[in-house]
Image (cartoon, grey):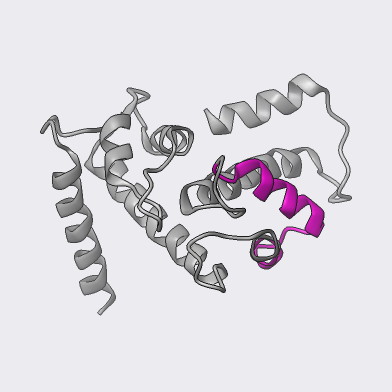
Amino acid sequence: QSDHNYYNRQNIAYQWFQTVDTDRSGFINLKELKQALVNSNWSAFNDETCLMMINMFDKTRSGRIDLFGFSALWEFMQRWRALFQQYDRDRSGSISGAELHQALAQMGYNLSPQFSETLVQRFTFRGGRPGIQLDRFIQVCTQLQSMTQVFRERDTNMTGNVRLSYEDFLSGTISRLM
């Protein structure tokens, strides 16, 4: 059964790859990815999130992803979409500060409600109602994971405190985000 599910997921990813690869190059570039991904309000994903995802799955550093990278990206997207829908309790198509706080707490982050509200304010689409769409949710959570990983590498005693220079911090996070 699990082999069958895996095959079905790979087949769907392959079909989606064929659809997204509009120039038939065998690769997906930023423009093609951006055209393929939409939020629940039918707005296109923002450039920053698309670029971040290309960089995460582009193993050759060519600025584009092949079928294998795309298949991994597709799985990544399915997991994040499911999480987003799980925490979008009011089914508004966006995550509020309270919903984000609950999501982050269940992911193991011990952050204040004010911090979650600040993230939502920072990542809310300008001119839109408060709340973050799927693309920004993925961006926020992925960046938090990267920064947390940098922090944990330096917090060898697991005290929740580290001493590091500003440049060390930037080097650790930039190497994971770009």
Residue, far left: 24
Residue, far front: 127
State left or right for residue 170 relative to residue 76: right
Q: Is residue 131 magenta?
A: no
Q: Residue at x 36, y 48 (%)?
A: 73
Toward which corner of the image does residue 143 lie, by quadrant?
top right
Toward which corner of the image does residue 154 lie, by quadrant?
top right
Q: Is residue 111 visible?
A: no
Q: Residue at x 56, y 73 (%)?
A: 89
State left or right for residue 52 relative to residue 78: right
State left or right for residue 80 relative to residue 163: left
Residue 20 in percent (x, y) is at 20, 43
Q: Can residue 21 be seen in this view?
A: yes
Toward which corner of the image does residue 87 lie, by quadrant?
bottom right
Main SS of the magenta part reads helix
State left or right for residue 96 relative to residue 12: right
Residue 52 in percent (x, y) is at 47, 35
Q: Is residue 122 magenta?
A: yes
Q: Which residue is drawn at 67% across and 29% down?
A: 172
Q: Count how many numbered circles sit on residues in the image.
A: 0
When the figure is inspected, residue 84 is found, relative to residue 45, above or below; the finding is below
Looking at this view, is 118 or 48 the one in front? 118
Residue 56 in percent (x, y) is at 44, 37
Residue 34 in percent (x, y) is at 33, 38
* Magenta-colored span: 102-125
Q: Residue at x 24, y 36 (%)?
A: 66
Residue, far top: 167
When the figure is inspected, residue 152 is found, relative to residue 3, above or below; the finding is above
